[in-house]
Image (cartoon, helix red, strand yellow):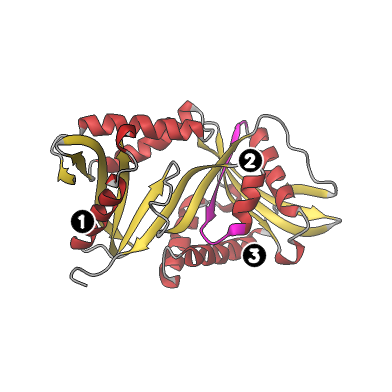
């Protein structure tokens, strides 16, 4: 019988959790330095997590870590970790721990439960909607550009219209993924853009591109260099709707990969929002690995 109990001393769990997390990041293609930087962000939150030991007939078989915190004005739960030791998998402990986590968070007022997966979870979280994926690929050599497509720096005159369109697209992506309401997404968009590019085109370590084909603008790109050690983050590689379906998406990625190398980085990373299957398929075909996948589910009111 599966039983769960909150631990007072989590040192053993944390050491094992960090080991597994680092292994998953490096397996996805990140350097040890980049993986360690990502782990630092996770460490900053661990102190607030409640960790339960999972036992079967008194024997420890795994752990599950949970937390409830305010998120955009409402309480949301999160499963920070759910791990069953290899000899004990496939015996129902995973489902029991998941159900316990859902109930634990709901009893503390959470109306949504999030989880960030760093390795395949089988069918365990099939009922959780995919909200987004973090993807990365190591760039070992200059990409082959698509014939007839060029990339140039964005001009000051082009920047205001680009910014307005990017902020609107960001809001649409967030809402489509089911992460936030339209009003919450607008506030997040304003806040995020203000923090990320406070100096506009002059913000250091950022590249803003305009993609052209046969003298016509077909898309844009925005990349942040040294986002992690050796890693450029692609905030946006956008192809205008009337030019989609012509292979330009891969051309935009090639332009981003070239800018990554020119900035001295060796890996390119993107976030793709849930519901954007076209982008997910494109990244998969181009060899971009999933570093993390965010999922969530609505929780019932206690007693419902």
Residue 300 is left or right of residue 148, and the answer is: left
Q: Is residue 68 visible?
A: no
Q: Position of residue 263 (x, y in %)?
A: 63, 34
Name the quadrant of the C terminus.
Answer: bottom left
**N-terminal label among 3 and 2:** 3
Nearer to us in this view, 64 or 56: 56
Q: Which residues are magenta?
A: 264-277
- Specify whether residue 275 is painted magenta: yes
| Label 2 packing within 10 angstroms: few (<14), some (14-19), many (20+) | few
Instruction: Check disc 1 and report its element: helix, strand or loop.
Output: helix
What residue is at 68 percent from the left and 55 percent from the top? 220
| Distance CA(mark 1)–CA(mark 3) | 46 Å
| Residue 253 position (above or below residue 299) | above
Quarter assignment of residue 144: top right
| Residue beneath disc 3 | 161
Assess whether residue 48 is covered by the magenta stretch.
Answer: no
Residue 104, image x and y in percent? 20, 56
The reply to whether residue 287 is in sight is: yes
What residue sits 55% from the left and 63% below the top? 167
Q: Would residue 170 appear left or right of 9 to someone viewing this image?
A: right
Query: Circle 2 — which element?
Result: loop
Task: Name the residue located 53 percent from the left edge and 63 percent from the top edge.
Answer: 173
Question: Closer to the camera: disc 3 or disc 2?
Answer: 2
- Work out whether residue 185 or residue 92 is closer to the camera in this orientation and state it: 92
Name the residue carrying label 2: 287
Quadrant (top left/top right/bottom left/bottom right) for the N terminus: top left
Which residue is tagged 1? 104
Mark 3–mark 2 distance (CA, rounded to whole Å): 32 Å
At 54% from the left and 62% from the top, the residue drawn is: 275
Q: Percent x, y for residue 296?
A: 38, 58
């Amino acid at each position: 019988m599966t039983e769960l109990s909150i631990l007072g001393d989590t040192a053993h769990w944390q050491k094992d959790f960090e080991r597994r997390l680092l292994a998953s990041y490096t397996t996805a293609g990140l350097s040890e330095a980049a993986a360690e930087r990502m782990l630092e962000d996770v460490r900053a939150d661990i102190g607030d997590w409640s960790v339960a030991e999972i036992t079967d007939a008194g024997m420890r078989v795994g752990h599950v870590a949970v937390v409830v915190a305010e998120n955009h004005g409402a309480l949301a739960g999160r499963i920070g970790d759910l791990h069953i030791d290899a000899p004990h998998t496939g015996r129902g402990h995973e489902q029991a721990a998941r159900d316990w986590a859902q109930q634990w968070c709901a009893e503390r007022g959470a109306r949504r439960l999030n989880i960030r997966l760093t390795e395949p979870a089988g069918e365990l979280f099939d009922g959780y909607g995919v909200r987004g994926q973090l993807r990365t690929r190591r760039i070992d050599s200059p990409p082959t550009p698509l014939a007839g497509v060029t990339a140039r720096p964005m001009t000051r005159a082009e920047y205001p219209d680009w910014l307005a369109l990017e902020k609107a697209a960001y809001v649409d992506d967030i809402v489509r993924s089911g992460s936030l309401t339209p009003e919450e997404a607008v506030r997040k968009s304003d806040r995020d853009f203000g923090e990320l590019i406070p100096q506009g085109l002059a913000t250091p370590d950022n590249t803003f591109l305009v993609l052209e084909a046969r003298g016509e603008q077909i898309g844009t790109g925005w990349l942040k260099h040294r986002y992690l050690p050796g890693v450029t983050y692609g905030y946006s590689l956008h192809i205008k709707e009337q030019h989609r379906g012509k292979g330009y998406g891969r051309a935009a990625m090639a332009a981003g990969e070239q800018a990554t190398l020119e900035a001295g980085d060796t890996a390119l990373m993107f976030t793709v929002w849930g519901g954007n299957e076209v982008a997910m398929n494109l990244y998969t075909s181009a060899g971009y690995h999933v570093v993390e996948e965010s999922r969530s589910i609505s929780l019932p009111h206690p007693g419902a």
